[in-house]
Image (tube, rainbow, N blue to C red):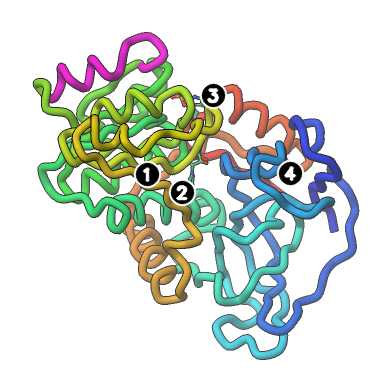
Amino acid sequence: MKAIRVHETGGPEKLLYEDVPLPSPAPGQALVKIHSIGLNFIDVYFRTGLYKSTLPFTPGMEAAGTVESIGEGVAVVNPGDRVAYAGAIGAYAGYSLVNASQLVALPDEVDFASAAAVMLQGITAHYLTHSTFPLRKGETLLLHAAAGGVGLLLIQVAKRIGAKVIGTVSTEEKAALARDAGADHIIFYARDDFEQEVKRITAGTGVDVVYDSVGRTTFEKSLNCLKRRGMLVLFGQSSGSVPPIDPGILNAKGSLYLTRPGLAHYTATREELLWRAGDILKWVSEKSLKLHIDKTYPLKDAARAHQALEERKTAGKVLLQP
Ligand SMILES: NC(=O)c1ccc[n+]([C@@H]2O[C@H](COP(=O)([O-])OP(=O)(O)OC[C@H]3O[C@@H](n4cnc5c(N)ncnc54)[C@H](OP(=O)(O)O)[C@@H]3O)[C@@H](O)[C@H]2O)c1
């Protein structure tokens, strides 16, 4: 089968399109024939070496396809089932091995591209708004990269709950997409001081929660945007890692909370995975959660897709086609 392989970490040119042997499932695993692959910023962290994997490896954490075969002891899926998953490495390939407990059955109404577009970022939007900081009607949030993959989904999930959304974006095109998804206020954070804008919009009060996946360039001002006892949810670092901080800052700025959550810890049990994926896939089936697929690249062009994502040229979801 064809797969993207990383033999050494570095730039997008390290993503090599190669022939590799078709694997067979070990006990507890399923072999999935991949129809559509979701691109995520975490794929960049693995490629650059910020997140570690044993070399060589096949990147990619999200895909949708059909179960080709199953290993011993697998009871939750059968060959031929339409499935999707998020959080198992090796999706940039024609087939991938996945622990069967990580697979979710797809409703008939959800096609493979939609499933690969929503599993990882949709479940992320779900756990951030339902569990990390359980949003309530009337609360106000600040969301960076509001027109990104997670961003456009998180806006919609927050609006279902009845929260007020302030989103930051870099361009007019991205602003239009974020507004269309339901954002109440847009800030152009590459041009304007977002801390001042948030204070203006909230009449000096600040927001209940900041969802910050940009990291290094936004972190400090994000803390300044919070209400007393508000929460900063740092869930990524697309601009680079945040340097170490003195916990005393959280006291000085108003007894703030800081958390750095990860998807794996919010989908650790099958029950939790099926709850979140079930909600997300139901909303997609009902068309109450809209997907914005920016572009689909052939798998062999994964390097071009990474480059576009890192250069902030994408909005919503990018897919790879094996
Ligand atoms: N912790 C978790 O469980 C979890 C799960 C999923 C994703 N994430 C994190 O969430 C973030 C978003 O992921 P995604 O896949 O949906 O990506 P994305 O938001 O579609 O793309 C990243 C966006 O970040 C913004 N950005 C700001 N500064 C940037 C910089 N220096 N370089 C690149 N981008 C920059 C850009 O939007 P503008 O052009 O509007 O600035 C860019 O489009 C990532 O940090 C990812 O690691 C975390």
Check disc 1 and give the amino acid type: Leu
Q: Is mark 4 within 8 Å of ligand 1?
A: no
The reply to whether dot 4 and dot 3 touch (C-beta < 8 Å) is: no
Find the magenta span and give its range: 189-202
193 vs 36: above or below:
above
The reply to whether dot 1 and dot 3 touch (C-beta < 8 Å) is: no
Q: Is mark 3 within 8 Å of ligand 1?
A: yes
Circle 4 crowding by C-alpha within 10 Å: few under 14, some 14–19, many from 20: many
What separation in Å lies between label 2 and label 1 (alpha carbons)?
A: 7 Å
Mark earlier in primary sequence (1, 3)? 1
Circle 3 sits on which residue?
A: 312
Circle 2 sits on which residue?
A: 121
Q: Is residue 36 left or right of residue 195?
A: right
Observer-side mark, 4 or 3, equals 3
Comparing 255 with 264, the one in front is: 255
Circle 3 crowding by C-alpha within 10 Å: few under 14, some 14–19, many from 20: few
Q: Residue at x 75, y 32 (%)?
A: 12
Mark earlier in primary sequence (2, 3)? 2
Q: Residue at x 41, y 14 (%)?
A: 190
Q: Is residue 198 left or right of residue 14?
A: left
Check disc 4 and give the amino acid type: Leu
Question: For residue 153, which numbered disc appears in the image?
Answer: 1
The reply to whether dot 2 and dot 1 touch (C-beta < 8 Å) is: yes
What separation in Å lies between label 1 and label 3 (alpha carbons)?
A: 17 Å
Q: Is residue 148 left or right of residue 37?
A: left
Residue at the outermost top position: 191
On the image, the x and y values in percent for residue 1 come to: 85, 59
Comparing 225 with 316, the one in front is: 225
